[in-house]
Image: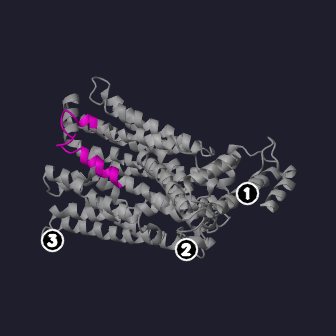
Amino acid sequence: MSSATSLAESSKNSHKGENGSLSPVLMNIKLPAVVSTTAKRSNKSNNSSNKNCQFMARMRMISVVLSIGAGSMFLVSLDSVVDNLIPVARNYLINLYGSEAEADLAWSWIVSARIYGLAFGCFGVFLISNLQNRKRPLLFAFLLNLLGGALSSLIRQPQIGIQLAFIGRFLSGIGSGIAHIVGAAMLAEIPPIRQRGIALASLTVWACLGELFGMFISLNNVLGTPDKWHIALGFPVLIIPFAMFFLATAPDSPRALLTSGKEDKALKSLQFYQNSEDWIVSMKDIRTELSEQYREEHFLLKQNVSASALIIMKSRFSTGKFVYPLMLGAFILTFTHLDDWLWISYSTQAFENAGVPTVIAQKSSLWMSIPQAMISIALLFCFEEISRRQLLILPTIGSVFCALISIYVVLSSGALISPKHLPVIAALDLCNAAVASASAYSIVPELFPQKDRIMGTALIGMTQNLFGGFLTTIALPLMNQWGIEYVLLPFAAMNVIYIIVVSKLLPETRGKSFHEISKSFPENLPTLCHKSFGISRIYPSLLTNIKRYLVHLAALLYS
């Protein structure tokens, strides 16, 4: 400790910033020394007290992890609840507007408002991506979710009920978008490396439980009745106050605090979330990230460039260290298990089209979500023992087979499996979704270093939700007018491409520090001929001929 302290003292004058605060280099030297001493002192204590401290630290971290999941991904229930509410809500809207067309249009806007709100929330996070704080944006997002749920429940109010429900679902979408991005970043930062994947995979557990809960409360013998269905639209947000309490009493992310220069608070946060045996490993990872960040900022200062938000953003998009994981993460999260968009939003309608009675179709939508939730919970116990890549590839292969079997039983009248067994196939497909989604939601935050994590995941989340909004807009008309095969067949083809891309390009992130993962990506910007894209060489003459062809085609069209 003495050598580290003397080195810090000798470097203080040359590494002080303009505001007199210590530079990241000094924090890198000073804080690990303090952590090392504290960890050694903790290890010398008796075994019983040490085990008690480890248990309390684990419980504190678990309470925050569960709070983040409950306040963010559990609100998937706001999406699944609208599936079984279609019959009763449609009757109300027909009586209100006087025509089926206007009723369907109003309901589609109410349903899609939350999805587009999610994209808007992700864009909002992108605008504040340089904000180091994690806890305050999360608490603000939870408040938006609470307000949005309350407004959604007012849908039956005379004259303005529909408008209030639309605004409410849009606000809850914004809150969920912020909570998902910032919450995933915080979950990637507070646990030790060996438990990081489990913390991130817990988001999928909450999503599956939320989907199951939404399906349950919207049944016609629970809240899906003519006099209670409006309550179901906002009922899931009642979990928010409990999540806010646990999060408000916990410290912010130690990485975020240290990046902000709050050394003492960062140490206390580390002691709050982690056992003493993990402190040094975590601080070495943070130290490496801070050194890289300081090196980039120092490079800008040497070139007489002010480190404004716009300049920092431009510098990020000019390096492959940010663009590569951004492109790869956007592909992984946007196209992971496309069948999910169909089964979550329109499973009841799909089962009815296959010949399943309405009442049974509603209950089937509930029952098919139970195996998915059970598998997502069981996966937590072995998540860190299995490759992230395998957890993406194998379930996606299973999803391809489920899609092809679904198409076969719907098109073939003499099939061995009746179309009425479609809910069973959908349940198997959702089990694949539980595994693949857990891996995808864990991988994306892991691809980015500390300074890029919020901006990168925000852009990816925005892409995912805009694409999801597009799919939910076209899936129902396609399925009703042409058949479910026109939805599932393109999904199966895309899943095949997904398997190839993941197996070729995705680096393994399990058990690696953020700095080690970042080393998998080159500094230079990606090009068509880069070896990382699996294409060894693209002939320039081919590109020239393509450009010439496009020019000639444009000339013919406008001549």
Q: How far apart, in angstroms, are the residues tagged by discs 2 and 3?
A: 40 Å
Q: Quadrant of residue 102?
A: top left
Sequence-first tag of 2 and 3? 3
Mark 3, residue position:
415
Closer to the chain start, of discs 3 and 1, is 1
Position of residue 158 in the picture relative to residue 319 (left or right): left
In front: 38, or 536?
38
Q: Residues within 10 Å of mark 2 (few under 14, many from 20)?
A: few
Relative to 521, say whether 206 is above or below: above
Which segment is the magenta one? Answer: 208-231
Disc 2 designates what residue? 534
Q: Amino acid at mark 2?
A: Gly
Q: Which residue is at 46% across, 40% downward?
A: 244
Q: Residue at x 37, y 67 (%)?
A: 493
Q: Which residue is mark 1?
A: 28
- Vertical arrangement, residue 248 with respect to residue 496, above or below: above
- Looking at numbered disc 1 in the image, what kind of residue is underneath it? Asn
Residue 269: percent from the left, percent from the top? 60, 50
- Residue sitting at x 82%, y 62%: 3
Residue 420 position in % (x across, y down): 15, 61
Q: Residues within 10 Å of mark 1 (few under 14, many from 20)?
A: many
Task: Tell me if I can see residue 433 in this picture.
Answer: no
The one of 312 and 206 positioned closer to us in this rendering: 206
